[in-house]
Image (cartoon, helix red, strand yellow):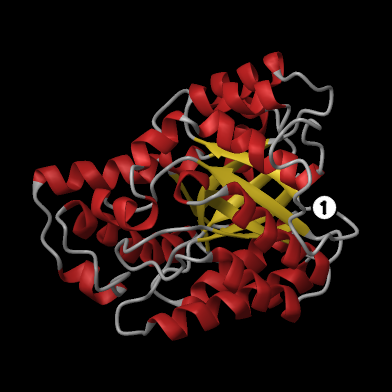
Amino acid sequence: MKLSILDQAPIAKGYTAKEALEASVELAMLTDRLGYKRYWVAEHHELDGLASPAPDILLGIIGSRTETIRIGSGAVLLPNYKPYNVAERYHVLATLFPGRVDLGIGRAPGGTAEVSIALAGNFLEKVKNMSKLLDELLHFIHRDFPEDNMFAKIVATPLPEVAPVPWLLGTSEKSAQLAAEKGLPYVFGHFMSDADGPAIVKSYFDHCVTDKAKAIVTVNVICAETIEEAEKIAQSNLHWKVLQAKGEGKKGVPSIAEAEQFQYTNEEMKIIEKEKQNQIIGDPEHVKRELEKLQKRYNVDEFMIVTITHSYEARKRSYELLAELF
């Protein structure tokens, strides 16, 4: 089993966005040394307590501070951009860090309707054209436009020796179908989907037009030396989900002390219980068993781990324990 990382650059309450981004760079350096396969950075716009609207900028810093770990977007939300601009940016990264760059692509807005309009104008219209936008981006990456295409003579410079590797990310049957149709490797967001993930991933493998189909599954994990400690650390994450549901999560991931003092209503407890179902929380042996169960259900050899805690040190320790396991 191979492990990778999806970083949403969470801002812990009481910390600044600068400190959150610096913590992401430190985590990337640590996990590079620990032997993780990929470090991907998510794209979010004005979402509660998240500090990464521009993954490519953060990836430029992370790439310069690491040696072997692959770096990538998780994901570039393509309807927000022109494909040519995306190709240019990831060609810059692939030129600087040869053979290490992934280009994860998604269709979600990554923010509110107002943010989508500010970024891209008619976002919904661009979502409808997602397949066309994706084709255009892939042509720029692979330099294989048909000769009669208006973009055939345009080059997204600089041209790297090794092109960035495109992936398609999603949480639904529709995204799996598109990845299969385009022959792209696929990442399923188990951590943020109520859908039947194993069935969706199987459908992708069954219908992919290439014999090189590959899938990664993204999972929420909090690991500590003991189950009790992991559950205590997870309280801040779970409390944050309650605050977000109430529209009160903008100050960032709350502390454990704040979570412990809160009196939850029945409806809020339902939110917490639902969130627990989408997370693996425990000591190393428990986490290993649960990941192995998921591996059998999904039939994949790589998991991308999301870990959000109030303490950046607890987050690093969680990834250290996982590395020791696998």
Point 45% across, 62% down: residue:
230
Return the residue nearer the eye: 153 or 259.
Answer: 153
- Amino acid carrying label 1: it is Ala
Q: Does residue 264 appear to the left or right of 142 in the view shown?
A: left
Point 67% across, 51% down: residue:
103
Check disc 1 and report the residue beneath it. 163
**Residue 187 seen anywhere in this rendered image of the structure:** no
Q: Quadrant of residue 146?
A: top right
Q: Position of residue 36 (x, y in %)?
A: 74, 61
Q: Quadrant of residue 249?
A: bottom left
From the viewer's perspective, is residue 197 above or below residue 91?
A: above
Q: Does residue 324 appear to the left or right of 176 in the view shown?
A: right
Return the residue nearer the eye: 54 or 134.
Answer: 134
Q: How crowded is mark 1: few (under 14 residues within 10 Å), some or many (20 or more)?
A: many
Q: Position of residue 123 (x, y in %)?
A: 36, 42
From the viewer's perspective, is residue 233 above or below residue 214?
A: below
Return the residue nearer the eye: 95 or 295.
Answer: 95
Q: Check disc 1 and report its element: helix, strand or loop.
A: loop
Quarter of the C terminus within the rendering: bottom right
Q: Position of residue 251 (x, y in %)?
A: 25, 73
Q: Where is residue 29 in the image (x, y as percent from the top left)?
A: 70, 77
**Residue 10 seen anywhere in this rendered image of the structure:** yes
Return the residue nearer the eye: 278 or 180.
Answer: 180
Q: Quadrant of residue 238?
A: bottom left
Q: Does residue 310 appear to the left or right of 151 in the view shown?
A: left
Point 39% across, 51% down: residue:
120
